[in-house]
Amino acid sequence: VAPGHPDNVVLVTSGAGDVDVPPSLRGRVVDVGFLSDTQRDNAMAAALAYVQPSALESFSRTVLEAWVAGTPVIANGGSAVVRHHVERSGAGLLYQNDAELVEAMRFALDEPVVVSNLARSGRRYVEDGFAWADVLDRMERTLTDWLPVPTGTEPDLTSHRGAGTGASR
């Protein structure tokens, strides 16, 4: 899609809704529609990078899914939460405008070794910070801090142990 790069580079979009591709980009932008979890995981793993274009994103599950698949992220720096995770993980590139997006895409095409290292950082970030049991432990600590426990009662905060399979698939 970036001018000056091979014709076999394609921007693939997925999800609900129609994608209005300009005539000049037909064949270079392909919308595959809604994907099953397995199809999504395979598509993420096969991608050179995952682009998160929303400046209004709060917490982006799709960014974490890309990192679990070993794919670096190119994200809109206008989203403070996504920016935080990209900067903290060291697993992606941020852009503020169209020119920076093009540069980030060119970088991903031109620097496959660096991009591969970004992808590894992302996977580690998710595995180290977002395993199911760890997330539940943090939630329980927060709830315990916020909500007083009536005297003489102790909540059972261990019922989730063994639940879920963690962040890795």
Image (spheres, rainbow, N blue to C red):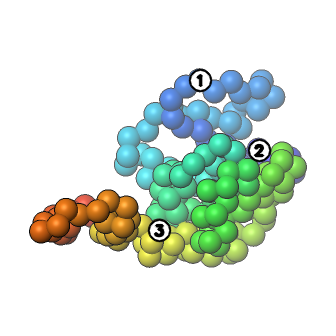
Quadrant for the N terminus in the image: top right
Query: Do the CB atoms of the residues marked 3 and 2 lie less than 8 Å apart?
Result: no
Q: CA distance from mark 3 to mark 1?
A: 31 Å
Answer with mark 3 or mark 1, whichever residue precedes in sequence.
1
Residue assigned mark 1? 18
Q: Marks 2 and 1: in contact by CB < 8 Å?
A: no
Label number found at residue 1: 2
| Tally of numbered tags | 3
Rendered image quadrant of residue 145? bottom left
Left/right placement of residue 67 relative to residue 93 reads left
Nearest to the eye among marks 3 and 1: give it. Answer: 3
Residue 19, compared with residue 64, is above or below; it is: above
Q: Residues within 10 Å of mark 2 (few under 14, many from 20)?
A: some
Can residue 169 be seen in the rendering of this structure? no
In the image, which disc is placed on residue 93?
Answer: none
**Residue 80 at what x, y percent from top left?**
67, 55
Residue beneath label 3, please?
Answer: 126
Mark nearer the N terminus (3 vs 2):
2
- Residue 92's quadrant in the figure? bottom right
At label 3, which amino acid type do we have?
Val
Residue type at mark 2: give it.
Answer: Val
The CA distance from mark 3 to mark 2 is 29 Å
Nearer the viewer's eye, disc 1 or disc 2?
1
